[in-house]
Image (cartoon, rainbow, N blue to C red):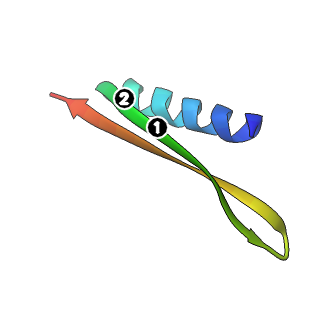
């Protein structure tokens, strides 16, 4: 979970480097379970301000 949060934060920072981004919301789910284990999922809702 911590690695997923770090990846999301890094992705948001990368978007902000290109311009102003407003995060509107986050959605976390445990995701799917397959032969490799649980794959969590996070969706970020954002708006790019112009």
Q: Position of residue 46 (x, y in %)?
A: 33, 36
- Is 22 positioned to the left or the right of 50 in the image? right
In the rendered image, the residue lying farthest to the bottom is: 35
Name the quadrant containing residue 49: top left
For the C terminus, which image quadrant? top left
Q: Residues within 10 Å of mark 2 (few under 14, many from 20)?
A: few
- Is 10 positioned to the left or the right of 44 in the image? right
- Is 3 positioned to the left or the right of 48 in the image? right
Name the residue that disc number 1 marks: 26
Name the residue that disc number 2 marks: 23
Mark 2 vs 1: CB contact within 8 A: yes
Rendered view: 33 above or below 18: below
Name the quadrant containing residue 9: top right
Mark 1 element type: strand
Mark 2 element type: strand
Rendered view: 1 above or below 39: above
Q: Residues within 10 Å of mark 1 (few under 14, many from 20)?
A: few
Residue ID at (47%, 32%): 12
Residue ID at (84%, 65%): 37
Rendered view: 28 above or below 15: below
The answer to which of 50 and 3 lies nearer the viewer is 3
The answer to which of 4 and 20 lies nearer the viewer is 4
Q: Position of residue 2 (x, y in %)?
A: 75, 34
């Amino acid at each position: 979970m911590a690695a997923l949060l770090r990846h999301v934060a890094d992705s948001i920072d990368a978007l902000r480097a290109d311009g102003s981004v407003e995060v509107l919301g986050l959605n976390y789910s445990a995701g799917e379970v397959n032969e490799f284990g649980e794959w969590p999922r996070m969706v970020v809702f954002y708006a790019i301000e112009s």
